[in-house]
C-alpha cells in the first residue's frame, strides 16, 4: 500500500507540472535546479548554511504536513498512516540527507532525521479540530489569502520575525527570517478562490493582475522593511541584503502570477505549492532571482490569457 501511494504522489506531481508547460518545466529542471544543487554543495559546509539549509527543508516539510487534506483518508485505509507519511518525507528529502552525509555533517543528518520523524508522527493541523478564529482588521478584505494564511501560520511568523529584528548583531538572523517568512507568504496562493470572488472590482485581467501584484507585493515589502533596516545596520553585505529583499518581493509577484496562470475555480494546486517553494529556495542564488523577474513577464502574459476565459464581460 505504501509503495502504491508513493507512486500516486509522483503521478500527481507529474500531472501538476503539466500546468506549466514543457518549456517552463525544462527550464526549472535543466537550468535552475542544477544551479541550486551546485549552490547547496558549495555552501553546505559553511556556517550558518549547514544549519539554515536543513532547517529550511524541514520547515517546508512541516508546512506541507500541516496542510495535508488526505490524513483522514489515509487513516481510513491504513492501520498506521504515520508510517506512510514518514516514508514519503524520507523519500523526498533523501538528497538533503545524502548531502549532509557527504559533507560529514553526521550530527546534522541525525538531527534532521529525528525532526522529520517528529513531523510525520504529529497530527496535521488540517486534521485537528480547533478554533483558530482571530481578528485581522488591519488586513483589507481583498487580501483574503493573507487572512487565511496568517491565521494558520501566526505563531511561526512571530517566532521567525522577532529574531530577524536582531540582524544588526548577526545579519544571518535577518537573512534566515526573510527566507522563511517569504516561503510562508508565497504558500498563501496555492488555493484558488471561487469564480464569484475573482476580480470583484471588474478591472479586467491585466489591471486585476497588476493591482494584485502591486497591492500584495507592496504590503509584503512593508512587512519586511523592519528586517531590511535592521540588517542594513550591520557593517557588511549591504547590497546582498537589499538584493534578497527585492528577490523576496519578486517571489510574491511570481506566486500570484503563477496562481492565475494555473487558475481553476475553487481548486488547490500542489504543483503551485511545490514550484513556489522551489523558486523560493533557488532565489537564494541572487543571479537566478533575476531570471525569475524575467520569468514573471511570461507568467503575466499567460495569466492574462487564462483569466480571459473566466472574466466574462471584463473590459
Image (cartoon, grey):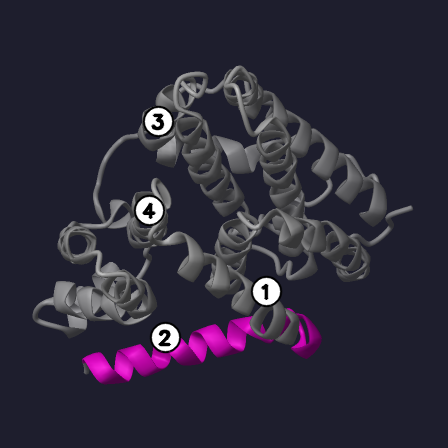
Which x, y percent locates residue 193?
Answer: 58, 48
Find disc 1 in the rendering and name its residue.
32
Point 53% across, 55% down: residue: 282
Over which residues does the magenta segment extend? 2-25
User: Quick one: SS at disc 2?
Assistant: helix
* Looking at the image, residue 185 lies above or below residue 33: above
Going from the N terminus, do you reach mark 1 or mark 2 first? 2
Q: Earlier in the sequence, mark 4 or mark 2?
A: 2
As measured in the structure, the alpha-carbon distance from the residue carrying label 3 to the one carrying label 4 is 23 Å
Residue where numbered disc 3 is placed: 133
- Residue occupying the point 20% across, 52% down: 108
User: Which residue has dot 2 on it?
Assistant: 9
The answer to which image quadrant residue 6 occupies is bottom left
Residue 173 in picture, x, y percent from top left: 39, 28
Residue at (19% x, 83% y) in the render: 1
Pointer 4 residue? 59
**Image side of residue 131 versus residue 154, left or right:** left
Q: Nearer the viewer, residue 214 or 95?
A: 95
Amino acid at each position: 500500500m505504501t509503495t502504491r501511494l508513493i507512486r500516486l504522489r509522483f503521478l500527481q506531481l507529474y500531472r501538476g507540472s503539466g500546468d506549466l508547460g514543457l518549456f517552463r518545466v525544462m527550464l526549472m529542471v535543466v537550468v535552475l535546479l542544477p544551479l541550486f544543487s551546485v549552490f547547496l554543495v558549495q555552501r553546505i559546509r559553511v556556517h550558518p548554511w549547514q544549519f539554515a539549509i536543513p532547517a529550511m527543508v524541514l520547515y517546508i516539510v512541516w508546512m506541507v504536513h500541516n496542510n495535508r487534506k488526505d490524513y483522514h483518508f489515509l487513516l481510513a485505509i491504513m492501520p498506521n498512516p504515520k508510517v506512510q507519511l514518514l516514508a514519503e518525507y524520507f523519500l523526498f528529502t533523501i538528497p538533503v540527507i545524502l548531502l549532509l552525509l557527504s559533507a560529514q555533517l553526521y550530527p546534522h543528518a541525525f538531527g534532521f532525521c529525528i525532526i522529520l520523524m517528529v513531523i510525520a508522527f504529529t497530527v496535521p493541523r488540517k486534521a485537528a479540530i480547533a478554533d483558530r478564529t482571530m481578528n485581522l482588521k488591519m488586513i483589507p478584505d481583498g487580501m483574503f489569502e493573507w487572512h487565511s494564511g496568517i491565521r494558520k501560520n501566526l505563531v511561526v511568523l512571530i517566532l521567525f520575525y522577532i529574531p530577524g529584528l536582531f540582524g544588526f548583531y548577526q545579519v544571518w538572523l535577518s537573512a534566515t527570517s526573510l527566507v522563511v517568512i517569504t516561503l510562508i507568504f508565497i504558500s498563501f496562493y496555492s488555493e484558488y478562490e471561487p469564480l464569484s470572488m475573482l476580480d470583484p472590482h471588474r478591472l479586467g485581467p491585466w489591471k486585476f493582475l497588476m493591482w494584485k501584484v502591486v497591492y500584495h507585493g507592496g504590503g509584503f515589502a512593508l512587512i519586511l522593511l523592519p528586517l531590511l533596516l535592521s540588517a542594513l545596520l550591520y557593517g557588511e553585505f549591504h547590497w546582498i541584503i537589499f538584493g534578497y529583499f527585492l528577490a523576496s518581493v519578486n517571489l510574491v509577484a511570481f506566486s500570484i502570477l503563477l496562481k492565475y496562470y494555473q487558475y481553476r475555480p475553487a481548486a488547490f494546486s500542489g504543483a503551485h505549492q511545490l514550484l513556489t517553494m522551489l523558486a523560493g529556495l533557488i532565489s537564494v542564488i541572487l543571479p537566478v532571482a533575476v531570471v525569475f523577474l524575467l520569468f514573471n513577464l511570461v507568467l503575466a502574459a499567460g495569466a492574462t490569457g487564462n483569466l480571459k476565459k473566466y472574466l466574462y464581460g471584463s473590459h
